[in-house]
Image: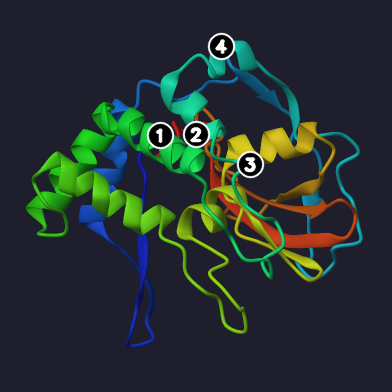
């Protein structure tokens, strides 16, 4: 599989492929020995197409996206197990202030330790060092990852720190009648299994490629019948941290 990255060209000519980023992401994909495969760790049922991003009332999928996931096999892996431990550390309501306990800090550290042992993160680290974007020292690099993902910040209008990059991207946040973030397949599966997510279907155009395995899905869902996500895209079946 080749991963292609496109960047917006400022002069208004549209999108242009970024060769270097495409190459490193393809390499990371190839060396990921913990990615999952259909029929082995999971099975999905894409079902119907979403034709209108503005229409969040039409459900084109009568069943769940996930038919099954081998949780016993999946969560024996250190990166998956330590990742799952982080998912209940945040307030879903984006207006509520976040507080981090000692136990949660340890869980953050355990997850970072786990992903830093992987070939994927070691290769990513090497690439970032070559670009002057990360320190060579592993301890300092771990701190950079921690600050990038877990450092809390205050959203506009909030009274206290109520968000962080990890929460937004991997866990998801509720803001009024919409869900923001939540671009991780493991969190999607767990929330769908818990009955919190109702999958509506996927977007046909330029979102699901006819590759050997479906690895990118753009889809629509609602949260507990109250908050909606008109479009959510995520790379799927990758190891946490990729």
Q: CA distance from mark 1 to mark 3?
A: 14 Å
* Viewer-side label of 4, 1: 1
Q: Position of residue 82 (x, y in %)?
A: 47, 29
Q: Position of residue 33 (x, y in %)?
A: 35, 20
The residue that mark 2 highlights is 83
Q: CA distance from mark 4 to mark 1?
A: 18 Å
For disc 3, the neighbor class at 10 Å (few under 14, some 14 to 19, many from 20) is few
Instruction: Provide the secondary structure element on which disc 1 rests.
Output: helix
- Is residue 83 at least partly visible in the picture? yes
Please name the residue shown 56% across and 34% down the image.
214
Label whose residue precedes the other's in the sequence (2 or 4)? 4
For disc 2, the neighbor class at 10 Å (few under 14, some 14 to 19, many from 20) is many
Question: Residue lying farthest bottom?
Answer: 11
Label whose residue precedes the other's in the sequence (2 or 1)? 2
Instruction: Find out whether the residues at labels 2 and 3 contact each other: C-beta distance under 8 Å.
Output: no
Label whose residue precedes the other's in the sequence (4 or 1)? 4
Left/right placement of residue 108 relative to residue 118 reads: right
Label whose residue precedes the other's in the sequence (4 or 3)? 4
* Tag shown at residue 111: 1
Instruction: Provide the secondary structure element on which disc 3 rests.
Output: loop
Please name the residue shown 26% across and 26% down the image.
117
Left/right placement of residue 159 relative to residue 20 reads: right
Of residue 200 and residue 134, the one placed in the foreground of this image is 134
Instruction: Find out whether the residues at labels 2 and 1 contact each other: C-beta distance under 8 Å.
Output: yes
The residue that mark 3 highlights is 88
């Amino acid at each position: 599989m080749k991963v292609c990255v496109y960047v917006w060209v400022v002069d208004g000519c549209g999108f242009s492929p970024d060769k270097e980023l495409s190459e490193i992401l393809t390499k990371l994909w190839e060396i990921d020995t913990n990615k999952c495969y259909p029929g082995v760790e999971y099975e999905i049922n894409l079902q119907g197409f979403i034709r209108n991003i503005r229409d969040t009332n039409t459900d084109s999928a009568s069943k769940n996206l996930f038919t099954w996931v081998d949780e016993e096999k999946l969560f024996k892996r250190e990166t998956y197990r330590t990742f799952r431990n982080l998912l209940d550390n945040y307030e879903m309501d984006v207006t509520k202030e976040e507080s981090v306990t000692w136990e949660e800090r340890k869980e953050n550290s355990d997850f970072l330790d786990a992903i830093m042992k992987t070939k994927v993160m070691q290769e990513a680290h090497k690439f970032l060092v070559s670009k002057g974007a990360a320190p060579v020292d592993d301890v300092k690099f771990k701190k950079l990852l921690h600050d990038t993902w877990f450092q809390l910040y205050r959203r506009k209008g909030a009274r206290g720190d109520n968000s962080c990059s990890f929460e937004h991207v991997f866990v998801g946040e509720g803001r009024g009648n919409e869900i923001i973030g939540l671009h991780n397949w493991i969190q999607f599966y767990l929330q769908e299994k818990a009955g919190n997510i109702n999958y509506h279907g996927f977007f046909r155009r330029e979102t699901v490629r006819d590759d050997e395995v479906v690895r990118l899905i753009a889809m629509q869902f609602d949260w507990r019948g109250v908050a909606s996500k008109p479009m959510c895209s995520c790379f799927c079946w990758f190891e946490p941290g990729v």
